[in-house]
Image: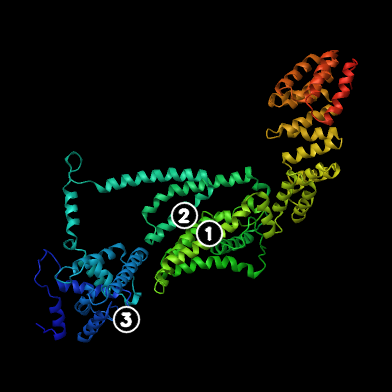
Amino acid sequence: MTSMPASRKAAATTLAPRSCPSRPGFPTSTRILRAIEILGPRLHLRRGRDHSICRRGREGAARGRASSPRGTIPRHGFSAKAAASSERPSLAMGSRPDRARRARVRARLQRRLDVGRRRERHRLRAGARGERALHDLARSACHPAVLPIGPYDLLDRAPALGARAVRLPRREHRPPRAERAAAVAAAHRPRSRHPRFMDRLRAVRRAPGPRGIRGVDHRAAADEGRARWLAVAIVTFALALLSKSVTMTLPLALGIVAWWKRGRLGRREIALVPFLVAAIAFGLLTIHLEYENVGVARLALPLTMAQRILLAGRAAWFYGVKLAFPWRLGFVYPRSSLDPSRPVAWLFPLGALAVPTGLLLLRSRIGRGPAAAALAWAATLAPMLGFFDIFFFRYSWVSDHFQYHASTMPLALAGVGLARAGDRFDRLWKHAHVALPAIVIAALAARSIQRVPIFHDSVALWTDTVRENPDAWIAWNNLGRLALDAGRVDEAEPMLRRAIAIDPRQHEAWNNLGICLMDRRRGAEAVFAFQRALELHPSGIAERENLGRARFLIGDWRGAAGLLRPVVADPRHDPDADVDLVEALVRSGNWTEAEAYGRAARARFPEDTRFHLLLGVVLRKKGALDEARAVLEDAAARSGRRDPVVLDALAMTLASSARFDEAARVEEEALRLNAGPGAEAVLRPHLESFRRGETPR
């Protein structure tokens, strides 16, 4: 038998089991040391770096290296036997160092170990199995026959299994695959498992199943539970599709997440097929609704395929930059130029493709997480990048609202990067892992608070939009409309004309300008504005109704009636259109058609007293006085006899029937309502005519 060198004999003697109770099946010290030496190169240790904790540990490590023969120290600067023999005083943390320093060392090592376990577990090539092997090995090595410390003390403070035990060295420093497999298999033998775990396992195996069957069919139970959860997921996904159409990109994101976790797509991902089918069906339905109901069909966006590719590249960079640096935000952003003839314009889509491609190529060095986050973000944002027409493209190519759902992926990646940065700066300042996220959160909160006043009301929102983007025609149009609603007609007209100057193809601006001109009693100009709005939006009900009202104001009764007839036939029309049509027919002398439209409007809107009034007037003009009086009595009762116009029409009908005393009493009742000087100027001459026994014209 070959003789062992003196230094190696001394090391083996130091680690030999002394008088202690033995456990059945406990691995020998030689096997433990061999496994530690195999797993040692997996640690992230620099060559020649001293990982001892205190002075005694450094001296022991130096003695161990000096006494070891040539070839027994691996190239990582670690020898399991020398470390185990020389580091025992440092691992036991003797009483010589002061307590404060010992507490600081222990806290620092424990914090680094916790951070490493939580954030870098996925970097183990062997996955969770490799980490379990590491812990089982530490538990075996901490038997009193080897090291008189606990397993977590070994993981925390041993030079071999130190604070960075969960990190891997570079690929070329890893031991051969066969040695790694042998070490993991040796550490995974059942005899090294914890006795309490084995007792629980035996209890579960001894537990009788239903109807005397021993054990449980775990595979059948797992399949049943998986099918149940799949049904629940499909139902909840359908509810998500009904709530927001952008959730149709969820199956793509889930597939990318599965690739991130396992590195491939297997049979388990077949469960995503129902989700993909539902997403495609709902996407087609959304496109149909956008074209037919929302109004995308009339946009007629002149975008070629090359321009759409340029738009997608610019939009991707825009969303990424705004998410990383939320500065100069706006509600409506300026439109970017999409000129395929410019070579510089193609840098945006090429760069947008280069980023995920580079992350995919670097996944072996930085992991699959960044590539998965970029791909999931792009997949979720794809419907908003310009390949499909969206109604908001009337105003801008991009909007912050479009990436609310997609931003969760890069934000999660940013959170991981922030934690890594805090862990790295923690070497310089022990509170860096808390201070760095706090600074970022405080900055984002301050930026959010700064944006709050902009959304106080519509005026503040559109004023800020005009300040950030003076060419936003929708902002000028809405500011003009708000000024019209507030009665500031003089302020509204220049705003609306500015919107038309920016984009003369928008019918809303022409329509609002016509309303402004009607309020200023400029009927001819209002007619031109409404005609232009109707040309741009031929199916618009509001534009046609406003044009008919403008013609009514300038005295074109027949033209107004011709425009209002198709408006009244549309079920979406406003009741004011019926009033204008009946009045235009009355003014033009078309009593028969006025009566027909009046009766139809009264049946459609029975609570509106205006139609009762108009029908009563038409019946009085036609000579049906009894029916006219009944209709007007009904209108007076519905209004609580508080409408002077209805009471005056009833008095006129009574006077037409030669019932002047009743007409005078009704007229006096209308005067007592104190409707104002204008109403009194009409009602008092009528009252005097009734008292004289005459019917006013």
Q: In the rendered view, tell whether residue 567 sits above or below residue 319.
A: above
The answer to which quarter of the image holds residue 487 is top right
**Dots 2, 1 in contact, CB < 8 A:** no
Of circles 2 and 1, the one toward us is 1
Q: How crowded is mark 3: few (under 14 residues within 10 Å), some or many (20 or more)?
A: few
Q: Is residue 86 left or right of residue 19?
A: right
Q: Which dot, 2 or 3, sits closer to the camera?
A: 3
Does dot 1 land on a helix, a strand or a loop?
helix
Res. 417 visible in picture: no
Q: Where is residue 652 in the image (x, y as percent from the top left)?
A: 83, 19
Label 3 element class? loop
Instruction: Look at 44% across and 58% down and name the residue there.
Output: 256
Q: Name the residue under label 3.
A: 49
Q: Mark 1 points at which residue?
A: 445
User: Which of pointers 3 and 1 indicates the residue nearer the eye?
Assistant: 1
Residue 396 in view in this figure? yes
Which colour scheme appears in the figure? rainbow
Image quadrant where residue 42 sits: bottom left
Residue at image position (58%, 65%) is 349
- Residue under label 2: 252
Q: Are there few (<14), some (14-19), or many (20+) residues within 10 Å of tag 1?
A: few
* Residue 305 in which image quadrant: bottom right
| CA neighbours of label 2 inside 10 A, class few (<14), some (14 to 19), many (20+) | some
| Mark 2 or 3, nearer chain start | 3
* 128 on left or right of 499: left
From the viewer's perspective, tell me whether residue 115 is left or right of residue 659.
left
Mark 3 to mark 1: distance in Å?
A: 43 Å
